[in-house]
Amino acid sequence: MRPAPADLVITGCTALVHDEAEQVGFRKDAAIVVRDRVIESVTSAASVRDLPAVQRIEAYGQVAMPGLINCHTHAPMVALRGLAEDLPTEEWFNDVVWPVESNLTAHDVESGARLACAEMIRGGVTCFADHYFHMDAVAAVVAECGLRAHLGEAYFSSQGPEGRERSAEFALRYRGTADGRITTALAPHAPYTVTDADLAATADLARAHGLPVHIHAAENRDQTDTSLARHGLTPVEVLDRAGLLDTDLLIAHGTGIVERDLPLLARTGGRTAVATAPRGYLKFAWPTTTPVRALRAAGVPVGLATDGAASNNSLDVWESMALTSLIQKSAEGDPRWLTSRQALHHATLQSARAVGLADRVGSLAPGRRADIVLVDLTGPHTQPVHDLAATLVHSARSSDVRTTVVDGRVLMRDRQLLTLDLPAVVAESGRRLPALTDRSHGRRIQEYGT
């Protein structure tokens, strides 16, 4: 009896796989069979030669790997890319970003999110964790374009109780939507913009509704020093006092995490994760970076991120992977850390854990959702290949991604976007820029002063 057609068969590739100890390895001349949006098997190309399929992709010379996850970004901020350059953090926020963000409309967020999603699909990102405003518009774009997303409506205490309530209402209304591709989180902005009372109330909401929390904290060492001077506590200790370390917590950046924070983070048993976005730290000339080695020793997952393109100029997680490896070597003074295979582990399973999706994505294995990217390594900049992991991390680029699949649906094939009209997206994103970037009103949504 002839087998029923698979929904998708990818054949002839080299597949990035994980063993039982989560070590990264590669299976040559492999094939991936997808049915009902799930990976049915990772097998040999020979075994699927006669398997019928609704869609078949011949991927010779390409590497199949789990889709990248952008663990912390503000996708609509692509509209601000290049607007606030060569500024220290305080001026960046107060003189440019927060005045401009006071102009934001839902339409601005929607058009920005659409441009960001096009960029991420083309860069092999299959899931992103977003923390911003007018998130209904972002959710609509995610549903339209086919990406996976972990979304939270950001709030400040200066907005009053309505901000926190709106964040909770969004999280409850949208979780599980877009055919299950959208998960949600409560999204207080940071300990320096959200009061202790609001942080504690957020922790109560998270426990009551089974919601995770996504927050900026200990972003840089200045924030930690200011918090110690003001409260006698580090930002991580402030979160602990509020009860947030007893929730499923994603901390953005954490370059200000210090040694006294590590026992608190270890106590959470992996429920607290950190997202690192190294390009922005270099641009702001922060003296420290996310302490990945110490966090891993404490059992804290560390995922890769870009932050928003207003600070990072890019939503390129591939670049974040390479920079994380290089900067960690420099910070630790040890060329043996972070290896290419370790970097790939952070880009896949560690990032999936960071956004609470390790049971669904992050590896190519039976039963996992079919979030897959195909990377072409035939270019001169990726040849010859002596060490495939090193080639992927340090030689390949996001532009080498040929095909992007999310939940079994092909969103890009041979560099052609299939769910977004890129010329129309680019044109629309530029129409409101004069009004969006106007700062003559003198308003700002918040004051940065940690």
Image (cartoon, rainbow, N blue to C red):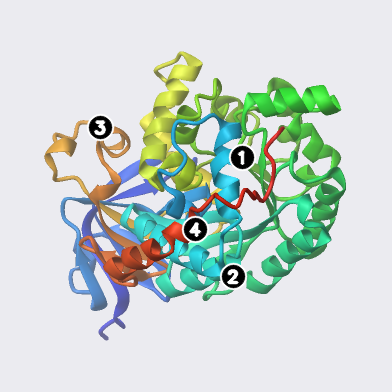
User: In the rendered view, does 377 fall on the left or right side of 7?
Assistant: left
- Name the residue that disc number 2 marks: 136
Tell me how far mark 2 sits from mark 4, CA to CA: 19 Å
Give the Cα separation between the discs numbered 3 and 1.
Answer: 46 Å
Circle 1 residues within 10 Å: few <14, some 14–19, many ≥20: some
Residue count near mark 4 (Cα–Cα under 10 Å), binned few <14, some 14–19, many ≥20: some
Q: Quadrant of residue 374?
A: bottom left
Task: Tell me which numbered mark, 3 or 4, is placed earlier along the sequence.
Answer: 3
Contact flag, marks 3 and 1 (Cβ < 8 Å): no
Q: Secondary structure at mark 2?
A: helix
Q: Quadrant of residue 263?
A: top right
Which residue position holds label 3? 387
Q: Nearer the viewer, residue 266 or 428?
A: 428
Residue 333 in the image: x percent, y percent?
46, 13
What's the mark number on residue 94? 1
Distance of label 3 from label 2 (alpha carbons): 44 Å
Mark 2 or mark 4, earlier in chain: 2
* Side of 170 where 2 appears, left or right: left
In the picture shown, does residue 309 fall above or below 170? above
**Residue 329 in the figure: left or right of residue 158:** left
- Residue 297 visible in the current orientation: yes
- The residue at the point 57 percent across, 26 percent down is 291
Residue 93 image offset from top left, x and y in percent: 59, 40
Q: Which mark is residue 336?
A: none
Label 4 secondary element: helix
Q: Judging from the image, what secondary structure is the residue with disc 3 in?
A: loop
Q: Residue at 43% of width from left, 58% of height from top?
A: 434
Mark 1 residue type? Asn
Q: Nearer the viewer, mark 3 or mark 1?
A: 1
- The residue indicated by pointer 4 is 436
